Image (cartoon, rainbow, N blue to C red):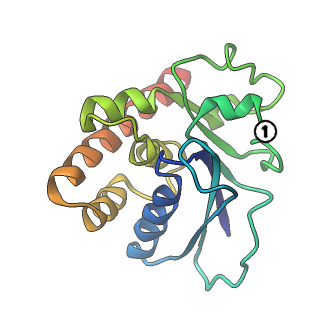
Amino acid sequence: MFQVRIHGRGGQGVVTAAELLAVAVFDGGKHAQAFPSFGSERTGAPVVAYCRISDHEIRAREPIMEPDVLIIQDASLIKQIDVFAGLQPRGYVIINSAETAEELQLADKIKVPHSLAILPATELALTHLGRPVPNAVLLGAFSALTGVVPLEAVASAINEKFKPKIAAGNVAAATAAYEYVMNQVATHA
C-alpha cells in the first residue's frame, strides 16, 4: 500500500487534493481511499488529509502515521508542527514554497535529495487560476516526483470535479508544476 499525507491550512484545498488524488488513482484501476482530519473548521487552521493507494481493497481506516509521501501545502507548518513525523526512510516530500531546502532548514529532516520537490505552487496557482489555491498544482508535482499516477489521470480527475473554466486553469497549473518538477529532477540527475 502507498500512503500519502497532505498538510495544509483550511481554505487551501487540502481535502479536495486528497479526493482528487483518490479519483485519479481509482480511474486508473487501483483502489483508493481519501479522508480528512481537522480540528476547528476555520480558514487558516491546520488541516491534514490522507490518501491510500493499493492494488487491493483497502480496509484500514486510521490516520496515516507512516506516509510514503508528504505534501506540504503551507511551508509555515514546518516550524509549527512535526509534519515529517513517521515519514518512510525513502519517502517523498513535496513542499509549496519559494524558499530553498536550506532556507527551510530541511537538512536534518530529509535524507534523500532526489525524494524532495520544492516549488512555488501558490504562485503557479495565482498565474493559472488567479487564486492562491495550490492543491491541483501539488498533484501535478506528485505525479512528476513519484510516478504513482500519470498527469493525464490527475487532469481527468480535475475535469470531473470542476466546471470547465476552473478545470482548465487547474489542469494548466498542474501541468506547469509537473514540468517544473521534471526539470528539477533532470537538473539533479
As rendered, which of 188 and 167 lies closer to the eye? 167
Q: Residues within 10 Å of mark 1 (few under 14, many from 20)?
A: few
Q: Is residue 153 above or below residue 143?
A: below
In the figure, is residue 45 to the left or right of 146? Answer: right
As rendered, which of 7 and 105 lies closer to the eye? 7
The C terminus - image quarter = top right
Residue 38 position by quadrant: bottom right
Residue 74 position by quadrant: top right
At horizontal 27% and vertical 48% (from top left) the residue drawn is 171
In the figure, is residue 83 to the left or right of 140? Answer: right
Residue 55 point in image, percent of width and height: 58, 78
As rendered, which of 14 and 68 lies closer to the eye? 14
As rendered, which of 135 and 94 lies closer to the eye? 135
In the figure, is residue 47 to the left or right of 82? Answer: left
Residue 104 point in image, percent of width and height: 68, 20
At horizontal 56% and vertical 22% (from top left) the residue drawn is 188
Is disc 1 placed on a helix, strand or loop? loop
The amino acid beneath tag 1 is: Ile
- State the residue position of label 1: 81
At horizontal 46% and vertical 68% (from top left) the residue drawn is 25
* Residue lying furthest left: 165
Residue 168 point in image, percent of width and height: 19, 49
* Residue lying furthest top: 103
The N terminus - image quarter = bottom right
At horizontal 77% and vertical 41% (from top left) the residue drawn is 84
Residue 124 position by quadrant: top left
How many discs mark residues in the rendered view?
1
Residue 39 point in image, percent of width and height: 70, 57
